[in-house]
Amino acid sequence: MLDYDLHCHSTVSDGLLTPTEIVNRAAERGVKFLGLTDHDNVDGLSEAAEAAAHCGITLINGVEISVSWRKFTLHIVGLGIDPLYPALIEGLQHIRSGRMRRAELMAESLARSGIGGVLEGAHRFAANPEIIGRTHFARYLVESGHCKDVGSVFKRYLVKGKPGYVPHQWVDLLDAVNWIRDSGGLAVLAHPGRYTAGRKSMGKPTLLELLTEFTDMGGQGIEVVTGSHTPAQYAEFSRYATQFGLLSSCGSDYHGPGESYRDLGRLPDFPLECKPIWSAWEL
Ligand code: AMP
Ligand code: MN
Ligand code: MN
Ligand code: MN
């Protein structure tokens, strides 16, 4: 069992628990090293650091950056970043302003198919209005009785081809990698088993091209053990980690009670050939 959990979300993005609650829950569940990785935002890190100091957890400053690469949206996790690094702060600010525009378009699109008032409704679920995203829309559509749970809302409304889906241009992969690296962090490809364009999954040839580009531009890690991978995928992505000389990372991608594949911590060990991402740190 790993006592590292290097990917999770708080109310500062689309999680249900505050940074303090996340840290305390992680500590109760045996996590010793926690990476808080809110989407496109580092504002939860100072609160998390304070909570971590009180319960003996080492907090890793993290972020999960939304990126457009070819026709895919990718997520790049930055670990050990400096949350005060100006280029990173400006880049994240730019992404957040795009999120607010996208939310308006999503609401307009849903209104055209007969579901009104969604922007206001979704904002009630977003503690931080700048980071408004599909999860907040999903929670509102559950509350207002359109679907039974968040997963069903995604399927019915929020993925490509559905009424609430709006294509969006995030930032370039190279920019995200540079902001992370230049701020002192390690750039990690998040949940590589989950990328799709529409209903089609990425496929091996494209994944190999992505991993080639990502490592060439300075990417250092890949999530092998993540809440949304199967054990077969731990093995598959550990092979890619070895092939591309990438460090292996692990994280639950926890978003809150009742909404996640996995709770915080207690992640299974890496396959033997993996070199853990923490071998790059002196903790
Ligand atoms: P956004 O960045 O606003 O496009 O929202 C992406 C977030 O939506 C992810 O980080 C997940 O938290 C959530 N998400 C994506 N797909 C699903 C799904 N099929 N079911 C539940 N949550 C999802
Ligand atoms: Mn999320
Ligand atoms: Mn993600
Ligand atoms: Mn995540």
Image (cartoon, rainbow, N blue to C red):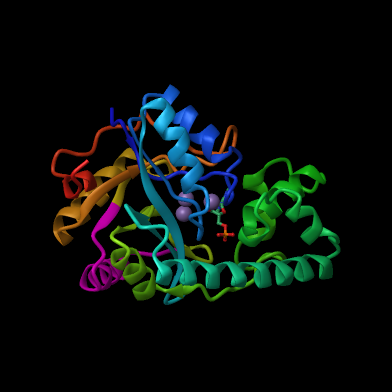
Q: In the drawing, does residue 272 fall left or right of residue 196? A: left
| Whether residue 139 is visible | yes
Tell me what residue is drawn at x 30 percent, y 58 percent: 185
* The magenta segment: 201-222
Tell me what residue is drawn at x 42 percent, y 57 percent: 83
| Residue 16 coordinates in the image, percent (x, y) | 61, 40
Q: Is residue 193 magenta?
A: no
Tell me what residue is drawn at x 20 percent, y 47 percent: 281
User: Which image quarter: residue 134?
Assistant: bottom right
| Residue 168 coordinates in the image, percent (x, y) | 57, 73
| Residue 136 coordinates in the image, percent (x, y) | 67, 52
Q: Of 218 and 159, which appears nearest the observer?
A: 218
Q: Is residue 70 above or below residue 96?
A: below
Q: Is residue 219 magenta?
A: yes
User: Which image quarter: residue 57?
Assistant: top left
Q: Of 48 and 173, which appears nearest the observer?
A: 48
Q: Is residue 140 above or below residue 217?
A: above
- Count up the numbered dots: 0
Tell me what residue is drawn at x 30 percent, y 42 percent: 232
Q: In the drawing, does residue 68 fall left or right of residue 102? A: left
| Whether residue 262 is visible | no
| Residue 130 coordinates in the image, percent (x, y) | 64, 62
Q: Of 203 and 129, which appears nearest the observer?
A: 129
Q: Report the quarter where the C terminus lies.
A: top left
Q: Report the quarter where the N terminus lies.
A: top left
Q: Is residue 213 above or below residue 78?
A: below
